[in-house]
């Protein structure tokens, strides 16, 4: 994966005039597209790998605590050092991409602009960049779409003639990243051959992914298992240490994920259930409502439909959906917490709702058949899952053509501080795992959904000065006919 001799010679020869050349190839709009998808925070430490003369670094330096510009060409690093002399938060490193000079897991973000197509082994280059990301850290790649301008190998030392976006996504997933987005920037890279009449005008993609957090899934499972167990204790009149007995009734504000202490107290949760909706479900489900919206009411369910409730919990939305689809319909509640599934199954049996079943499973790998569901519901759950993009891909898989997605979930108006994101207790509280609204909707779109509509609902608040609120999102799976 070391820089080839051809690339070393090429960049040594153009370093002194690279910025002028670059301006002809691609504009600052490529950099702005990368920054917009990075969701940076001022306390971050980031790296610009394949920094060249400092094009990306110049955009990063005003936005973060520190930028480390890395390039395998001493001549290019010297050009960057001169161009960026006004910044005192930039460090320069001459280093090979295969041997990044950082310990594992110390950077908040890594950027690679027009670097990957010069790498002999792009998959290994991605793995090297992911290695240095901290849990929750983000990789941002901007590069060329696949093309057939072979002369660029000889004249510009390109190892790859761009990339297929599906291949890039597969490499990001293989490296352990989640919430993958590979999308167009709306920009092109333009170049003229010096030996041919050919002119290249190649579209530029942006690819982003996030390194998994450590312990998020376990913290969420433990929290909701304890909630189910303590609610059962409360119903039996036993003492409990969790304080869940004091939870407010489901129809009242504050029912979702509220807890004593911690930053999540700043967020007010209100599912907005109507009295008739509460009356239509078993009391055991209504007593343990953990929602931030009312997706079942918004879905306009019809008799005979098949409905899937992702993260069904005690079953309030599952049971309400069962009343709407009737005896000819079917509703599947899916939850990863055994205690919740057992509680919901008992309630379904007691209520005699034979059209309802509850399955134990992960939202990222649903035990549900392809093309088998008319409507998917989810209420304040997907924020608890690390790979939200994978959840939406799974949702798309199990929906029938033309099937509908109706979810309520917590999102943010911007990036949360690194320390907040890494607090596992906050993940279990429905807040710290929330994504910026635009990233959340981008992931819905990436999964293939169309007709995406989003509107704010009642739950809202702020964490570390960042607005947090619930969003009702509806979308539809494409119909091939």
Image (cartoon, grey):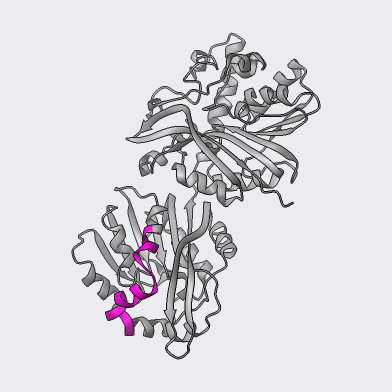
Viewed as shown, does residue 330 lie left or right of 108?
right
In percent of width and height, residue 352 lies at 78, 17
Question: Is residue 64 in the magenta section?
Answer: no
The answer to whether 26 is drawn above or below residue 387 in the figure is below
Decide which of 313, 24 is in the foreground and name it.
24
Residue at 71% of width from left, 41% of height from top?
Answer: 367
Residue 16: in magenta span? yes
Query: How many discs appear?
Result: 0
Is residue 178 at all visible to an observer of this figure?
no
Q: Residue at x 25, y 62 (%)?
A: 90
Q: Main secondary structure of the magenta part?
A: helix
- The answer to which quarter of the image holds residue 66 is bottom left
Residue 88 location, x and y as percent? 20, 60
Residue at horizontal 59 percent and vertical 8 percent from the top: 237
In the image, residue 338 above or below residue 421:
above
Q: Quadrant of residue 218?
A: top right
- Residue lying furthest front: 481
> Whole-percent x and y of residue 231?
58, 17
Residue in view at x 75 percent, y 32 percent = 305
Front position in the image: 95 or 385: 385
Viewer-side residue, 260 vs 368: 368
The residue at the far top in this view is: 237
Q: Which residues are magenta?
A: 12-32
Determine if residue 150 is in view.
yes
């Amino acid at each position: 994966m070391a820089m080839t001799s051809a690339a070393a010679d090429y960049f040594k020869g153009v370093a002194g005039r690279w910025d002028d050349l670059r301006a002809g190839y691609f504009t600052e709009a490529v950099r702005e597209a990368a920054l917009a998808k990075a969701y940076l925070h001022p306390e971050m430490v980031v790296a610009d790998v394949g920094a060249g003369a400092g094009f990306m670094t110049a955009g990063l330096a005003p936005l973060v605590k520190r930028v480390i510009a890395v390039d395998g060409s001493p001549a290019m690093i010297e050009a960057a050092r001169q161009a960026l002399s006004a910044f005192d938060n930039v460090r320069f490193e001459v280093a090979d991409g295969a041997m990044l000079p950082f310990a594992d897991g110390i950077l908040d973000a890594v950027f690679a602009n027009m670097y990957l197509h010069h790498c002999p082994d792009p998959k290994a280059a991605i793995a090297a960049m992911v290695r240095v990301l901290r849990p929750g850290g983000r990789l941002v790649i901007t590069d060329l779409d696949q093309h057939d301008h072979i002369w660029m190998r000889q004249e510009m030392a390109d190892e790859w003639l761009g990339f297929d976006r599906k291949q890039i996504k597969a490499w990001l997933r293989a490296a352990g990243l989640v919430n993958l987005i590979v999308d167009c920037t709306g920009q092109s890279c333009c170049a003229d051959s010096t030996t041919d009449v050919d002119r290249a005008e190649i579209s530029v993609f942006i690819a982003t992914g996030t390194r998994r957090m450590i312990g998020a899934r376990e913290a969420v499972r433990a929290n909701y298992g304890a909630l189910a167990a303590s609610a059962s204790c409360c119903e039996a009149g036993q003492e409990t240490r969790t304080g869940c007995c004091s939870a407010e009734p489901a129809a009242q504000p504050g029912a979702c994920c509220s807890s004593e202490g911690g930053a999540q107290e700043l967020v007010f949760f209100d599912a907005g259930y109507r009295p008739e909706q509460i009356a239509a479900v078993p009391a055991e489900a209504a007593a343990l409502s953990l929602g931030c919206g009312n997706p079942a009411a918004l879905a306009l369910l019809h008799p005979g439909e098949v409905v899937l409730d992702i993260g069904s919990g005690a079953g309030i939305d599952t049971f309400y959906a069962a009343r709407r689809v009737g005896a000819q319909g079917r509703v599947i509640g899916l939850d990863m917490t055994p205690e919740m599934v057992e509680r919901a199954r008992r309630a379904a049996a007691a209520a005699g709702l034979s059209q309802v079943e509850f399955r134990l499973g992960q939202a990222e790998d649903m035990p549900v058949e392809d093309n088998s569901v008319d409507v998917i519901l989810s209420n304040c759950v997907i924020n608890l899952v690390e790979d939200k993009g994978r959840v939406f891909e799974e949702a798309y898989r199990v929906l029938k053509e033309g099937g509908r997605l109706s979810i309520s979930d917590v999102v943010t108006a911007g990036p949360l501080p690194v320390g907040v994101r890494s607090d596992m207790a906050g993940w279990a509280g429905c807040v710290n795992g929330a994504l910026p609204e635009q990233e959340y909707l981008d992931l819905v779109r990436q999964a293939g959904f169309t007709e995406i509509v989003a509107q704010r609902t009642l739950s809202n608040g702020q964490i570390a000065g960042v607005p947090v609120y619930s969003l009702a999102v509806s979308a539809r799976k494409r119909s091939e006919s």
